[in-house]
Image (spheres, rainbow, N blue to C red):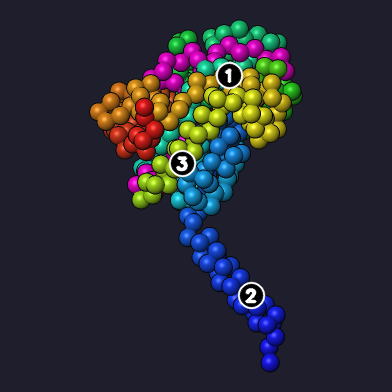
Amino acid sequence: MKTKFAIRTAMAATLLGCAMSAGSIHAQSKPQVIIGYEDNGADPYMVSMAEHLFERHMNADVEYKLFSSGPAAMSALASNSLSFMCGLGVPPLVTAIAQGLPMTIVYNQERYTNAAGIVVKPESGIHDVAGLQGKKIAIVAGSQASFELATFLAQAHVPYSSVTQINMAPPQMRTSWVTGAIDAAIVWDPVFSALRTAGGKAIKTDGDLPRGASSYNVCIANADWAKAHPDLVRGFVAALDAGYQVTQKDRDKALAEMARQTGVTVPVAQSELAGYELFSGADQTTPKVMGSGAGVKTSATYETLVNTAKVLHSIGRIQSEPASFESNVAPQYSQSLAH
């Protein structure tokens, strides 16, 4: 005959089992979201990561995946093994679109001003862009840097083919800089700042580019996947905006979190962040970012896609320019954040 204690224990075990089973079902019902990102230095989306804002706003099981560059992430996006990619430059996106991949910008994070550009060694004898002729420059081929270099060279009337480009990931540039294998580099933070700290001189920054043919970090998704999961995309952009808001309202806290995420000091994180023009969720539907309705086609983001395609086509990175980018700029997911 069972004692009352044994009966209570059995009932408790049964209830616990039911609760665990219900919890497992609930956990399984949460969507899986994988967010890719690059190391672009200090950035508000790191606050969104550190404070679990993506998990909260999307109500999803979120996994983060670091990529060395934008081109490396595109195959993962194309196969839907990656839900979102942040910190991506525009050229890899334009290249993917030109290849027929249905990629779309769901959030434009920021415009580079002083956080990227061309840095040269003082002993190289290079004093301006014209001085790059016949020199060796490190570059992540196919990244934002390809567009920037082609634009800066054209402005200085220097033939694109006259500069020897050495393709390498940003971390490799630090080693090549020390060994003397390169005369210059066109790169973004944190390596851009690191090379300047090591004695390099910046002869151009992305702030020299016009807004409609500029250098942006964007968050993208597979357009078909985004249409099928609009609530997740809206939650994703809300989380990015929340990270931006913390950065604006509590800069010290945000910088501390960014420094932890990137493994740098707070002053370095502050310097890196100062090299961006940051965009909020409300900014997304304005002309200086993605616009809204008919205004999308005259927005700075759309014009940058068009101008980037022209440059990439002229230097042979893409075979033809896409006829339209209407399906590749998606401010609608940020509409609820507009003031």
Query: Callout 2, which amino acid?
Result: Ala
* Mark 2 nearby-residue class (10 Å; few <14, some 14–19, many ≥20): few
Residue 18 appears left or right of 183: left
Compared to residue 214, the image places residue 229 above or below, namely below
Query: Callout 3, which amino acid?
Result: Phe
Label for residue 13?
A: 2
**How far across and down, in percent of the image, does residue 19 sit?**
56, 68
Q: Nearer the viewer, residue 120 or 222?
A: 222
**Residue wearing tag 3:** 236
Task: Assign a secondary structure to mark 2.
Answer: helix
Residue at image coords 47%, 60%: 29
- Of the numbered discs 1 and 2, the one sitting upstream in the chain is 2
Residue at image coords 35%, 34%: 335
**How far across and down, in percent of the image, does residue 233 sit?**
42, 43
> From where the camera sits, is residue 95 visible?
no
Residue at image coords 50%, 51%: 60
Circles 2, 3 touching at the beta carbon (< 8 Å): no
Quadrant in which residue 2 is drawn: bottom right
**Of labels 2 and 3, the one closer to you:** 2
Query: Callout 1, which amino acid?
Result: Ala
Q: Is residue 204 magenta?
A: yes
Compared to residue 258, the image places residue 204 above or below, namely above
Q: Is residue 86 magenta?
A: no
Label for residue 274?
A: 1
Q: Which residue range is magenta in the image?
A: 198-227
**How far across and down, in percent of the image, does residue 323 sit?**
28, 33
- Of the numbered discs 2 and 3, the one sitting upstream in the chain is 2
Q: In the image as oriented, which residue stretches furthest toward the bottom?
A: 1
* Mark 3 nearby-residue class (10 Å; few <14, some 14–19, many ≥20): many
Q: Nearer the viewer, residue 73 or 61?
A: 61
